[in-house]
Image (spheres, rainbow, N blue to C red):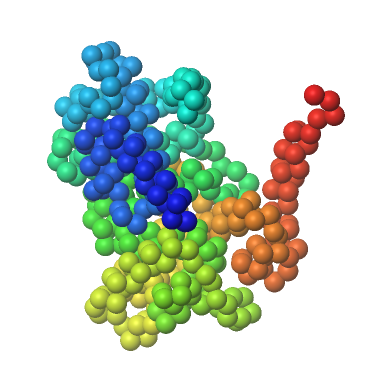
Amino acid sequence: MPINSNTKKLDELKNRLSELPEFVFNFIQRYIKNTTSLNTKIAYCKDAKIFLEFLKTLSKFKDINNIKQFNINHIKELVKIDIEDYLLYLENYNVTYDTHTGKTVTLGIQNDKQGKMRKLSSLRSLFDYLYSSELIEKDITQLVKMPKISDKIKSKLSVDEVVLFLDTIEKGSGLSKKEKAFFDSTKTRDIAIATTLLGTGIRVSELVNLNINDINFKDSHFKVTRKGQNEEIIFCNDEVISILKKYYEERINTPGIAADHQPAFFLSSQKRRIDEKTVRNMIKKYSRKCGIIKNITPHALRRTFGTNLYNEVCDVYLVAELLGHKSVETTKKHYAELNVERKRRALKQYKLRD
C-alpha cells in the first residue's frame, strides 16, 4: 500500500475511533491483532457504530444522544432478543452523514444474509473481547444463531463469507468448551492453513506435502509439487506470509516429532504430517460453526481464490497459470459463468436511448 494511501487509512481509523466509546476503542486497539489490515480495523469500527446507532433506538436507552455515551453498564443490560432485533434492524436502516460540501445526506441501507452474518460475526468478536476481559458476565451473542445461507452449485465463498470464515477460526466463535480446549493448541495452524488456501489457491494435496525447506520467508514464496511432479514457485502476499511465519515459530519448537515427519511444515495433533482428510474436516467444521451451509471444502477455497483473482485481473491465462491448470480450457470451463454474468451486467447498462 502506498505511503500516502496508508496515511489516509490511519487518519480514517483515528477519526472513526474518536467517535466510539472507550470499550470499543480498547477492543480495536487491544483485541484486534496488529497484523490485521487497516481496512479490516476500519470495517470493525463501522460495524460497531452501526450497532451502537441501533442501540439508540431502544427504549431502554432513550436518554442516549450520542453513541460515545455508551459504556459497559449499558452493554450489560442487553439480552438475547436485543441482538435478534439488531439483525432485523440490519435488513433496512438509514445512515445520515455530512458530505465534504456540508450537505446532509440520508441513505437507506439494506443487508442480505451474508451482510448480516458478517456484522454478527464482528459483534461476536466485540463481545468475546468484553467477556474474556471479564467486563461482562455472559456473551449473549453466542445465543443467537447465524443467518443460514443456502447451498449453491460449485460452492465458493463470497467476500463477506471469507471474512466471517477467517474470523471464526481466529476467535473460535461457536465452539464448545471441549472444542475450545483443543482449538487453543491448533488455532495458529488452522488459520495458517485456511489463509494459505484462500490466499494462494493451491490444492490441498500440495498444501499437506509442504516441507519446511520449501518456504522462503525472505522472498515471500514457497515451492509446491504440482500434478505431474512439476515443481512451481508460489508467491504470497503479506497476509499469507505473516501467518505462515507465526505458525513456523510454533512448528520449530514442537517436541516429539518422529524422524520421518520432521521435514513436514503442517503437523497434525499427533505430531505427524497432516493429511488431506484432517484438512477437509477442519474446513468443514469451521464453515458450519460460522453458519455457512454450503459444501465448503479445500477445493471450494481454491475456487474462491480463482474467482476473486479472475474478477480482479480478468485474465484467464494468468489465472490458469497461478492455479496450475495444464490447459487454459480447464480455467475457461470453471469461470465461464463469470464471463456470462459480466456480459449480462454490461448489456443492462447499455442503452440505445437515454
- Residue 113 or residue 143, whichever sits in front: 113
Q: Residue at x 43, y 55 (%)?
A: 3
Which quadrant: the C terminus?
Answer: top right
Of all residues shown, which one is farthest toward the right? Answer: 352
Can you say whether 80 is above or below 206 in the image? above
- Residue 54 or residue 82, whichever sits in front: 54
Count the marks: how many? 0
Residue 192 is situated, as x and y percent measured from the top left of the image, at 39, 63
- Residue 353 or residue 31, whichever sits in front: 353
Residue 73 is situated, as x and y percent measured from the top left of the image, at 16, 27
Q: Residue at x 42, y 46 (%)?
A: 8
Q: Is residue 287 left or right of residue 321?
A: left
Q: Is residue 225 visible?
A: yes
Quarter-of-image position of residue 127: top left
Quarter-of-image position of residue 74: top left
Q: Residue at x 19, y 29 (%)?
A: 71
Q: Is residue 93 visible?
A: no
Of all residues shown, which one is farthest toward the front? Answer: 101
Q: Residue at x 48, y 20 (%)?
A: 103
Q: Is residue 177 left or right of residue 260?
A: left
Residue 321 is situated, as x and y percent measured from the top left of the image, at 65, 68
Can you say whether 248 is above or below 9 in the image? below
Residue 25 is situated, as x and y percent measured from the top left of the image, at 25, 39
Can you say whether 137 is above or below 4 in the image? above
